[in-house]
Image (cartoon, helix red, strand yellow):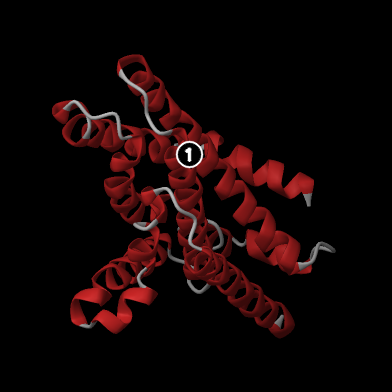
C-alpha cells in the first residue's frame, strides 16, 4: 500500500491540484488572519479556524474530485479493479495521500502561530486542540469527497456533489436545532474552545470511517460486475 500512497501523493504535485489547494487555503487563511486576529490586536490563534472551516468547505472538492472520477474517465480504473491490491487498500491509500496534503497545509498555518508568539503569548493547548479538530474535520470532508468521486466519472459532478453536501450540512441547524449534531462545521466549532469533546471526536471519526466503507463497498460492486 505504501507504493500506492506514494504514487497518489506525488500525483498532487505532478499536477496543479496540490499547489492550488494549498495556495488557495493559505491566501484565504491570511485574509482571515488579518481580519480576525491582527486587526483586533488578538493573539487567539484558534479564532482563525472558525473561518478556516468555511475555507475547507469550498476547496476540499478540489482535492478529492479526481481521486476516482478521473481514473474511471481515462480507463485507469480497470487496472485498479483487476490489480492484486485490494480495493480497501486502494481507497485507504487515496485517503491517506489526500490527508497528507491537508497535514502539510496545517503545518504551513503554524507560521501564523509563530507570528502571534512574536507579539504575545497564544494559548498553546487551545491551539493544539483546534488543530486536532480541524484535521478531524478535514479527514471527514476528504472521506466524503472520495466517496462522491467514486460514484461518477465526471470530476465536476463529483465536486458539485461534495460541495452541495457540505453546504447542506452547514445549514442544517438553521432548519431545526435537532440537526446541529449532524452539522460537521457545528461539531468542529467546539474544538477552538480548547476542550476535546469525546462525542464530537467520535462523530467525526465515525463519519470518516463510514464514508470510506461506503466507497469500498461501491468499488467492490463495480469490481464484481467486471
Residue 183 is at least partly visible in this image: yes
State the residue at coordinates (32%, 20%): 120
Q: Is residue 95 left or right of residue 175?
A: right
Instruction: List x then y, in percent, for residue 138.
Output: 47, 53
Q: Is residue 122 above or below residue 223?
A: above
The answer to whether residue 207 is above or below residue 21 is: below
Return the x and y of residue 218 as percentages of the image width and height.
61, 79
Q: Position of residue 27 (x, y in %)?
A: 29, 32
Which image quadrant is residue 181 in?
bottom left
Q: What residue sits right under mark 1 in the picture?
A: 125
Pick the residue in front: 70 or 212.
212
Q: What's the residue at 48%, 62% (across, down)?
A: 197
Considering every residue shown, the one lying at the far top of the view is 118
Residue 7 falls in image quadrant? top right
* x, y percent for residue 122: 37, 29
Q: Residue at x 34, y 51 (%)?
A: 53
Q: In screen coordinates, is 184 left or right of 76?
A: left
Q: Quadrant of the C terminus?
A: bottom right
Q: Is residue 115 left or right of residue 75?
A: left
Q: Identify which residue, 114 or 94, lies in the foreground.
A: 114
Q: Looking at the image, which residue is at 39% across and 64% down?
A: 187
Q: Quadrant of residue 46?
A: top left
Amino acid at each position: 500500500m505504501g507504493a500506492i500512497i506514494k504514487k497518489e501523493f506525488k500525483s498532487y504535485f505532478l499536477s496543479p491540484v496540490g499547489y492550488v489547494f494549498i495556495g488557495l487555503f493559505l491566501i484565504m487563511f491570511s485574509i482571515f488572519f488579518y481580519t480576525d486576529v491582527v486587526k483586533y490586536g488578538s493573539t487567539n490563534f484558534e479564532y482563525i479556524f472558525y473561518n478556516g472551516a468555511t475555507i475547507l468547505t469550498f476547496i476540499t472538492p478540489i482535492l478529492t474530485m479526481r481521486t476516482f472520477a478521473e481514473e474511471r474517465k481515462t480507463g485507469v480504473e480497470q487496472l485498479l479493479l483487476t490489480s492484486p491490491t485490494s480495493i480497501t487498500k486502494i481507497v485507504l491509500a487515496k485517503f491517506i495521500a489526500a490527508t497528507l496534503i491537508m497535514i502539510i497545509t496545517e503545518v504551513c498555518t503554524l507560521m501564523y502561530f509563530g507570528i502571534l508568539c512574536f507579539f504575545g503569548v497564544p494559548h498553546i493547548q487551545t491551539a493544539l486542540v483546534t488543530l486536532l479538530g480541524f484535521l478531524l474535520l478535514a479527514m471527514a470532508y476528504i472521506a466524503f469527497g472520495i466517496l462522491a468521486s467514486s460514484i461518477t466519472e465526471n470530476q465536476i459532478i463529483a465536486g458539485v456533489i461534495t460541495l452541495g453536501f457540505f453546504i447542506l450540512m452547514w445549514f442544517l441547524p438553521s432548519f431545526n436545532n435537532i440537526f446541529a449534531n449532524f452539522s460537521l462545521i457545528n461539531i468542529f466549532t467546539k474544538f477552538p474552545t480548547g476542550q476535546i469533546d469525546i462525542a464530537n471526536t467520535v462523530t467525526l471519526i465515525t463519519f470518516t470511517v463510514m464514508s470510506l466503507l461506503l466507497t469500498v463497498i461501491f468499488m467492490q460492486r463495480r469490481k464484481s460486475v467486471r
